[in-house]
Image (cartoon, rainbow, N blue to C red):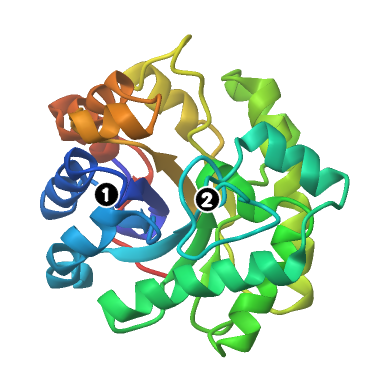
């Protein structure tokens, strides 16, 4: 066991609060159990407003962030160019549009502002951090809008951004879904540059990328993620209880319950106790 002075700080963030009642319930339970120290919220979905009061009551126990959403679901307000049928595109379509510079930055920024306002309305404060569903906040054009969002709301000194960059050598050593992790890291490097130019803080490492078809979050995988991880690393996860609302809204179902069970397990607690990491830190 490491001494207190040797401990490194891990930000363990549960994504998708607001997606479904079962997801919300699992995340709130993990916050109360001190098994996570960050949560990222989808404020354009109906179950955000339903359960935000529960999160607000315990928000002093965790960092609460904004999970910007521009894929699969419904925007807060009609977006004629990105969602002409009131349905946001798949990630593949959004990625293609971003790379080919076919996105309207003004339209994107307007929706991001609406999601930001929906967060403020329920939480009564700025988000501690900003990230994106399917990591969309790192894509070209969208990342410009994210930085502009922070600047126009005068919170660039208070709100940090989640960066998916990890040096390739760390990803190769861990050997977990390396190609997927590299693709996220490449776009993360672009956002990191924008954040540096605007003096916006961000996490210093990024872990948690894996394919549920090939892996399960367990002691072995969690240990591999911690390999070579640095102080201030963020690990994202997707715990949740499967319910009909989740089944109707998202293809990721059973792995959420498996993640929840691991995070609640004695195995998780033992690894954290024996590792050089702590969840006690709020940057």
> In the current view of this chain or complex, which residue is farthest to the top?
214
> Residue beneath label 2, please?
86
Q: Quadrant of residue 238?
A: top left
Q: In the image, is 78 to the left or to the right of 223?
A: right
* Quarter of the rendering occupied by the C terminus: bottom left
> In the current view of this chain or complex, which residue is farthest to the front?
85
Q: In the image, is 80 to the left or to the right of 203?
A: right
> Residue beneath label 1, please?
36
Q: Is residue 146 visible?
A: no
Q: CA distance from mark 2 to mark 1?
A: 34 Å
> What residue is rendered at 20% in x and 29% in y?
244
> Where residue 110 sits in the image (x, y, percent)?
61, 73
> Where residue 262 sits in the image (x, y, percent)?
23, 26
Disc number for residue 206: none
* Quarter of the rendering occupied by the N terminus: top left
Circle 1 Cα neighbour tier, 10 Å, few/some/many (<14 / 14–19 / ≥20)? many
């Amino acid at each position: 066991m490491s001494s207190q002075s040797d401990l490194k700080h891990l930000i363990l963030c549960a994504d998708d609060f607001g997606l479904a009642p079962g997801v919300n319930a699992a995340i709130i339970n993990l916050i109360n159990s001190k098994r996570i120290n960050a949560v990222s919220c989808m404020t354009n979905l109906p179950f955000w407003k339903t359960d935000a009061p529960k999160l607000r009551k315990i928000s002093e126990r965790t960092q609460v962030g904004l999970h910007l959403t521009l894929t699969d679901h419904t925007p807060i307000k009609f977006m004629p160019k990105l969602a002409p049928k009131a349905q946001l595109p798949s990630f593949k379509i959004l990625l293609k549009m971003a790379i080919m510079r076919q996105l309207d930055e003004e339209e994107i920024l307007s929706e991001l502002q609406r999601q930001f306002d929906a967060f403020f309305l329920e939480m009564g404060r700025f988000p501690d951090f900003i990230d994106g569903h399917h990591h969309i906040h790192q894509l070209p054009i969208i990342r410009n809008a994210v930085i502009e969002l922070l600047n126009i709301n005068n919170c660039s000194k208070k709100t940090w951004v989640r960066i998916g960059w990890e040096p390739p050598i760390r990803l190769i050593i861990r050997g977990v879904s390396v190609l997927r992790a590299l693709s996220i890291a490449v776009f993360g490097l672009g956002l990191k540059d924008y954040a540096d130019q605007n003096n916006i803080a961000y996490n210093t490492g990024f872990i948690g990328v894996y394919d549920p078809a090939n892996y399960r979050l367990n002691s072995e995988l969690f240990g591999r993620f911690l390999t070579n991880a640095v102080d201030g690393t963020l690990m994202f996860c997707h715990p949740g209880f499967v319910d009909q609302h989740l089944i109707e809204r998202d293809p990721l179902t059973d792995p959420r319950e498996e993640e929840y069970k691991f995070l609640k397990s004695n195995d998780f607690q033992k690894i954290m106790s024996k590792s050089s990491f702590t969840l006690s830190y709020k940057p």
